[in-house]
């Protein structure tokens, strides 16, 4: 579980998307993953509230 006030401290960060010209050549995910530091910060936003898209 993250920090209770983590969502106030860390802004929501969206995963960057791949270029459209690159995406039309394959069937891979269209988003790129965040770096490990970014994933840790996003995990700290979690309050176990059950909202899947926060």
Image: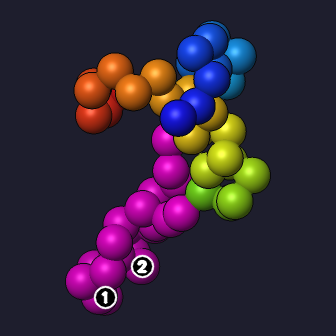
Q: Secondary structure at mark 1?
A: loop
In the image, 31 versus 11, the foreground residue is: 11
Going by the image, does 47 lie left or right of 41?
A: left
Name the image quarter holding the C terminus: top left
Identify the residue at image location x=47%, y=22%.
47
Q: Which residue is mark 1?
A: 25
Q: Give the spatial CA distance, label 2 vs label 1.
A: 6 Å
User: Hey, which residue is sitting farthest bottom in the picture?
Assistant: 25
Q: Which residue is mark 2?
A: 22
Residues under numbered marks 2 and 1 in contact, where contact means CB atoms less than 8 Å apart = yes
Q: Position of residue 1 (x, y in %)?
A: 53, 35
Magenta stretch? 13-33
In the image, 21 versus 28, the foreground residue is: 28
One can see residue 13 in this view: no
Q: Position of residue 22 (x, y in %)?
A: 42, 79
Identify the residue at image location x=29%, y=88%.
26
Q: Is residue 27 magenta?
A: yes
Q: Main secondary structure of the magenta part?
A: loop
One can see residue 4 in this view: yes
Give the number of callouts.
2
Circle 1 Cα neighbour tier, 10 Å, few/some/many (<14 / 14–19 / ≥20): few
Q: Position of residue 49 (x, y in %)?
A: 34, 21
């Amino acid at each position: 579980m993250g920090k209770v006030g983590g969502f106030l401290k860390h802004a929501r960060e969206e995963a960057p998307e791949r270029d459209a010209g690159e995406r039309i050549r394959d069937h891979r995910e269209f988003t790129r993953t965040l770096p490990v530091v970014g994933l840790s910060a996003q995990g700290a936003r979690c309050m176990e509230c059950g909202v899947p898209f926060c």
